[in-house]
Image (spheres, rainbow, N blue to C red):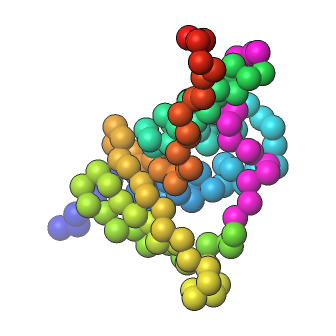
Amino acid sequence: MVLVLVGACSRVPPDATPDGALRLWIERMDQPTSDTKQAQEAYALLGPETRANLEERAARASRAQGRHLESYEMLALGRFGLKFRPASMHAQTAGDSARVEVVGDDPTVDHASVRMKREFGTWKVELDLVPLPPVQRRPGLN
């Protein structure tokens, strides 16, 4: 008797793992383009904390420039630079949080740790952005 197993051939989406989502984000950010779609794809790979920070940055920039800016426009596509090229990535997962340890060619110097969050079944990159200071208001103005 011969048993033939036919399995559905399906690929795991890159953002199904923390390191896969980080690789995908780096790939999107590293493209030398000013394409809006590319920026939106990179932005979609960001976690809720990072998106909130960029939304506030976009709101402040919109007020300063007198025109509406989208939060994905706060990403510097094409001007993004890595301190080193990743040689390996290893994810440490705890529930819906993870850290991806990124190592370059020289592990003593080329090392980074990136926070990740699982959101609706996919992993998102949480960047360690500088918190925004409170908005300064002139006395007597609302």
Residue 79 position in % (x across, y down): 79, 51
Point out the image quarter for the N terminus.
Answer: bottom left
Q: Left or right: 85 with respect to 54?
A: right
> What residue do we see at 81% from left, 43% from top?
33
* Residue 59 in sight in this render: no
Q: Left or right: 113 with respect to 42?
A: left
Point out the image quarter for the C terminus.
Answer: top right
Work out whether 9 lies above or below 4.
above
Residue 28 position in % (x across, y down): 66, 49
Q: Is residue 54 magenta?
A: no
> What residue do we see at 40% from left, 64% from top?
99
Residue 65 position in % (x across, y down): 78, 21
- The foreground one among 132 and 47 is 132
Determine which quarter of the picture holds residue 140: top right
Determine which quarter of the picture holds residue 138: top right
* Residue 24 in sight in this render: yes
Q: Left or right: 140 with respect to 66?
A: left
- The foreground one among 46 and 123 is 46
Q: Main secondary structure of the magenta part?
A: loop
Q: Is residue 69 magenta?
A: yes
> What residue do we see at 79% from left, 49% from top?
78
Residue 71 position in % (x across, y down): 62, 30
Q: Left or right: 64 with respect to 20?
A: right
- Start-end of magenta stretch: 66-82
Q: Residue furthest front?
A: 139
- The foreground one among 22 and 8 is 22
Task: Tally the marks.
Answer: 0
> What residue do we see at 54% from left, 71% from top?
112
Determine which quarter of the picture holds residue 67: top right
